[in-house]
């Protein structure tokens, strides 16, 4: 009689499936006193480990099934096209009427190589604003545990008014920074940036016939931080050009800069 009770409940009563966002395509089959429950774990891969629980619900009361074998428990490997659990029903209950089935899959370990994680895009692009100037430009890069970031700025530089210079003050600057992730918690990351920059400066040189002004490229250093919240990115960096390393004469354009960027990652 118990077997007939199970058979009638499976075919007469509509079965409702309740599942987490990662679980899909749940189906139930009966084979004698056993019930087979199939399901899929969406967007999983073999580098992920899940804790899977299967429950049946009667009148809103959820009870975890115990006498079962197959793809359930604390070590279910992701990436399979389909998973199955075989439940020996009568070892857990005397009879089963109309029941709802619940499948819960909790990700407990993820060893997916970071560059392959679609949910954590590493490429970012930002619009950048530099002061003094103002200057505008773009910063882009790849930032994981370690990474690299590039920035280009075009600016209207501030010129020393006492220099007597009246030419074009449009100067550009390029930076390359290596990055290291400092923290990663609750979808919020902090990265440290350090690298080199090279930019145009205006050098004033005193000659026998008068004052000469020339555009030169000067090397420098850059340090800063980047902050990532989900897909939003914000960065701030300080840069300094060292004109004395390559040129003689006095720099009449600014050599120290502060740059802020905002953008997104994907």
Image (spheres, rainbow, N blue to C red):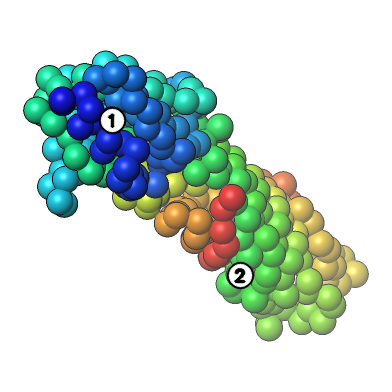
What residue does disc 2 label?
129
Residue drawn at x 32%, y 43% as measured from the top left: 12
Q: In this view, does 39 lie above or below 214?
A: above
Nearest-to-viewer mark from 1 and 2: 1
Counting the numbered discs, the total is: 2
- Tell me if I can see residue 219 in this picture: yes
Q: In which quarter of the image is the N terminus?
A: top left
Instruction: Determine the CA span between mark 1 and mark 2.
Output: 70 Å
Q: In this view, does 32 lie to the left or right of 255?
A: left
Which residue is located at x 86 percent, y 72 percent? 210
Left or right, 170 with reference to 149: right
Give how far across and how far down residue 151 sits, in percent: 66, 54
The residue positioned 90% from the left and 69% from the top of the image is 209
The reply, left or right, for residue 225 in relation to residue 134 is: left
Q: In which quarter of the image is residue 201?
A: bottom right
Name the outermost residue toward the top.
69
Q: Assign a secondary structure to mark 2.
A: strand
Whether residue 179 is visible: no
Q: Which of marks 1 and 2 is nearer the N terminus?
A: 1
- Position of residue 252 relative to residue 216, above or below, is below
Q: Which mark is residue 7?
A: 1
């Amino acid at each position: 009689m118990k077997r007939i009770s199970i058979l009638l409940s499976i075919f007469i009563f509509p079965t409702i499936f309740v599942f987490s966002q990662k679980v899909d395509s749940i189906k139930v089959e009966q084979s004698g006193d056993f019930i087979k429950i199939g399901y899929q774990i969406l967007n999983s891969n073999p580098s992920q480990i899940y804790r899977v629980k299967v429950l049946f619900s009667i009148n809103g009361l959820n009870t975890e099934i115990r006498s079962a074998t197959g793809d359930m428990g604390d070590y279910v490997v992701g990436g399979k096209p389909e998973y199955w659990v075989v439940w020996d029903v009568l070892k857990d209950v005397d009879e089963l009427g109309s029941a709802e089935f619940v499948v819960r899959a909790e990700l407990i370990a993820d060893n997916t190589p970071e560059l392959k994680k679609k949910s954590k895009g590493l490429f970012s692009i930002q619009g950048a604003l530099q002061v003094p100037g103002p200057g505008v430009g773009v910063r882009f890069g790849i930032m994981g545990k370690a990474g690299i970031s590039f920035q280009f700025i075009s600016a209207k530089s501030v010129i020393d008014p006492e220099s007597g210079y009246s030419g074009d003050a449009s100067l550009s600057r390029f930076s390359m920074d290596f990055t290291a992730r400092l923290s990663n918690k609750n979808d919020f990351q902090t990265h440290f940036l350090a690298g080199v920059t090279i930019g145009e400066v205006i050098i004033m040189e005193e000659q026998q016939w008068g004052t000469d002004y020339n555009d030169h490229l000067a090397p420098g250093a850059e340090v800063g931080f980047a902050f990532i919240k989900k897909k939003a990115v914000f960065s701030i960096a300080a840069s300094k050009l060292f004109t004395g390393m390559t040129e003689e004469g006095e720099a009449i354009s600014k050599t120290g800069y502060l740059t802020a960027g905002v953008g997104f990652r994907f």
